[in-house]
Amino acid sequence: METEFIYYRHTTPIGVRIEEITGYEQLSGPNWVAFAKQVFSENSKDGYRVIDHYDSGAPFLDGESSRISVSHTGHMLIVASLPKTPEVDLSIFNPRTALGIDVESNSREQVLKVRDRYLSNEELAIVPADDITANIIAWTAKEALYKAALIQGIDFRSRIRIKSLPTLNSNSTANAYVIDDDGNKIEFVLYSYESEGYIITLAISLKTATFKKRK
């Protein structure tokens, strides 16, 4: 079945702006991603935009001072963004711009087979072994936290830690932390939702500048 690209823009309850590109199932792989990024680039209020990457691998928009995070799988490309923060160097970690996002199919059973590789013993106890949804939330949370922390090569089991899982499709959040290279704990908030057959998880620090005021 052939479909067109669908572009959808919205803001999450934690104040992060989301742009989703789905559809066009007749194309797949790198070609689909390339076309989806083109759709994203053309759907801006301020003209054409280009996604580039710092040496650290973190994505950014040319000429923009807004922190973004990007993820894609299957027929979903998703871009999360924060308000403009011209005072912050976006190429390095800063708690005001700590943002990560990850997306995965809601039916990807492979996560059940590899959970021991990325979950600590404490995390294994709070993520049911036979619950696909919970394990996908945990996996996307780890990936989102990795992107938000901007620490290359960090161990997922020992230094990226989930304290609780967010409830899917609710306004509730969960907590996690990342241990930096100096041994300090960076506290994060997690939020997860489902869209078009995919589970998306966001990670932001407690000090991140967002599109809504913190309570």
Image: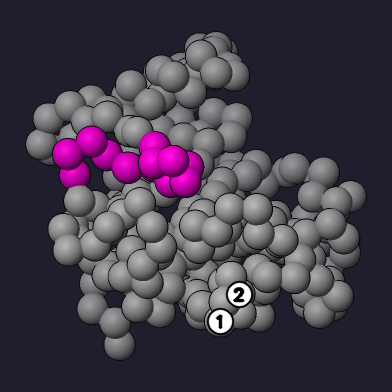
Q: Which residue is mark 2?
A: 179
Query: Label 1's element?
Result: loop
Span highlighted in magenta in the image? 53-64
Q: Main secondary structure of the magenta part?
A: loop
The answer to whether residue 98 is seen in the rendering is: yes
Looking at numbered disc 2 in the image, what kind of residue is underneath it?
Ile
User: Which of the two residues, 60 or 25, is positioned nearer the viewer here?
Assistant: 60
Neighbour tally class for label 2: few under 14, some 14-19, many 20 plus, Cα within 10 Å: some
Q: Which residue is mark 1?
A: 184
Tell me whether the residue at label 1 lies in contact with that at label 2, contact meaning CB atoms closer than 8 angstroms.
yes
User: Which of the two residues, 152 or 121, is positioned nearer the viewer here?
Assistant: 152
Please tell me whether residue 62 belongs to the stretch shown in magenta.
Answer: yes
Q: Earlier in the sequence, mark 1 or mark 2?
A: 2
Which image quadrant is residue 43 in?
top left
Q: Residue at x 81, y 71 (%)?
A: 120
Q: Residue at x 87, y 60 (%)?
A: 116
